[in-house]
């Protein structure tokens, strides 16, 4: 069976990483697996190809592009695609119409929970719709005319092989040395695009409160984006430069997570972020905002703490719990790891999608 994942691009992001992981896992299980980018492929193309996944690129024009539907339909027929799997709104529209014209069944995964809408006809043409959390499912049904029976929840999954429970302590010492982190520094980490919805400025405000209390702490910020200059300027204006490390875009998140004590996500919009799952897989407790699917992942007082978005004092309070009571880090981190193993592992996610694809072929 040939399953094609359709995305907008393969620029760096959680959705894109998930599509690559799913496509690669399907290939390992004997499927023909490919990814179709409606726009230019992006920096993650090489990662997909390194896993043996074929990547196709289209150059979607701005606005409505009827020629793209025609070209996509031809490609689906030529490559003998059996199932079309679209991710989010733009691929949903173009992929669904092309799949219908090519006579192929299609499904859509709705990542996140933004108030995006599509016409009832598009949803009707999809054999199934997947939400990545119960919260995302509720939001999807609220804003769109979809039969509830057609929507199911499949949680995102993490490749646990990238997060061994034991690792080389010398590697951690070397990384700390590279980033000028003292052995006894309390290390906080966040990973994500430096963009408005991730709200790293609120995290920096919380961190400023921590430093003013003379905490011996370092904040690692992995990621890049349009707000980088603003965030760097905030650090310069608030005497945080020596305490904050901007690591830029990274493809070695598992290594970074080994260095940190806790993980913090301050965003005000999420589905089920892979970054939280990665931190939990690395046995790190999580402080996250109480938005989207985060409460379905982070168990208050067991794997971390949930805080309202936009309140730096609440984030600082949650961080301080771990700073003053270090034994909680190992306890909560261990529970977090077990939860990922049970509910959010890549094998479980891939099996759920595989079952869905097989059901479509029977119809």
Image (spheres, rainbow, N blue to C red):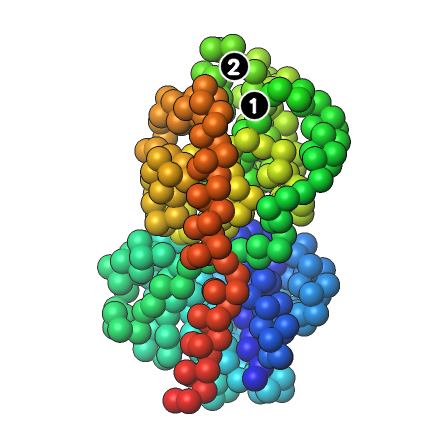
Please report whichever mark, 2 or 1, sits nearer to the chain's N-terminal start: 1
Q: CA distance from mark 2 to mark 1?
A: 8 Å
Kindly identify the residue that appears in the image at 36 percent across and 53 percent down. 113
Image quadrant occupied by the N terminus: bottom right
Residue 135 in the image: x percent, y percent?
31, 54
| Quadrant hosting residue 139 | bottom left
Using a 10 Å C-alpha cutoff, classify the residue at mark 1 as few (fewer than 14 neighbours), some (14 to 19) or many (20 or more): some
Residue denoted by label 1: 186
Q: Is residue 229 left or right of 101 when viewed as pictured?
A: right
Q: Is residue 93 left or right of 81 when viewed as pictured?
A: left
Look at the numbered discs 2 and 1 and tell me whether their residues touch, using CB distance below 8 Å.
Answer: yes
Residue 29 in the image: x percent, y percent?
60, 75
Do we see residue 22 in this rendering? yes
- Nearer the observer, 24 or 106: 24
Do we see residue 72 in this rendering? no
Image quadrant occupied by the C terminus: bottom left
Residue denoted by label 2: 215
In the rendered image, the vertical position of residue 235 relative to residue 342, given as above or below = above
């Amino acid at each position: 069976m040939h399953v094609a994942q359709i995305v907008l691009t393969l620029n760096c992001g959680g959705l894109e990483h998930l599509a690559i992981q799913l496509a690669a896992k399907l290939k390992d299980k004997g499927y023909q697996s490919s990814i179709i980018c409606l726009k230019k492929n992006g920096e993650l193309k090489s990662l997909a190809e390194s896993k043996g996944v074929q990547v196709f690129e289209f150059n979607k024009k701005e606005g409505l592009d009827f020629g793209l539907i025609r070209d996509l339909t031809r490609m689906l027929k030529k490559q003998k695609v059996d199932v079309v799997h679209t991710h989010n709104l733009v691929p949903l529209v173009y992929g669904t119409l092309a799949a219908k014209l090519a006579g192929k069944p299609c499904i859509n995964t709705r990542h996140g929970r933004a108030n995006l809408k599509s016409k009832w006809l598009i949803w009707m043409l999809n054999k199934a719709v997947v939400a990545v959390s119960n919260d995302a499912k509720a939001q999807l049904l609220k804003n769109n005319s979809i039969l509830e029976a057609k929507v199911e929840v499949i949680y995102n999954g993490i490749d646990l092989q990238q997060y061994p429970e034991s690792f080389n302590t010398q590697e951690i010492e070397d990384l700390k040395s590279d980033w000028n982190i003292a052995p006894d520094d309390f290390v906080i980490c966040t990973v994500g695009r430096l963009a408005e919805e991730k709200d790293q400025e609120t995290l920096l405000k919380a961190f400023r409160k921590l430093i003013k209390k003379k905490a011996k702490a370092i904040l690692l910020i992995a990621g890049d984006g349009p707000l980088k200059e603003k965030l760097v300027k905030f650090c310069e204006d608030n005497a945080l430069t020596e305490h904050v490390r901007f690591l830029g875009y990274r493809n070695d998140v598992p290594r970074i997570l080994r260095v940190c004590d806790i993980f913090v996500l301050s965003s005000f919009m999420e589905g089920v972020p892979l970054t939280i799952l990665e931190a939990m897989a690395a046995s790190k407790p999580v402080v996250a905002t109480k938005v989207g699917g985060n409460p379905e992942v982070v168990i208050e007082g067991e794997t971390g703490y949930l805080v309202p978005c936009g309140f730096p004092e609440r984030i600082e309070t949650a961080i301080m719990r771990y700073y003053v009571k270090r034994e909680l880090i190992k306890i909560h981190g261990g529970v977090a790891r077990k939860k990922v193993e049970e509910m959010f592992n890549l094998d479980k996610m891939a099996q759920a999608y595989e079952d869905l694809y097989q059901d479509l072929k029977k119809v």
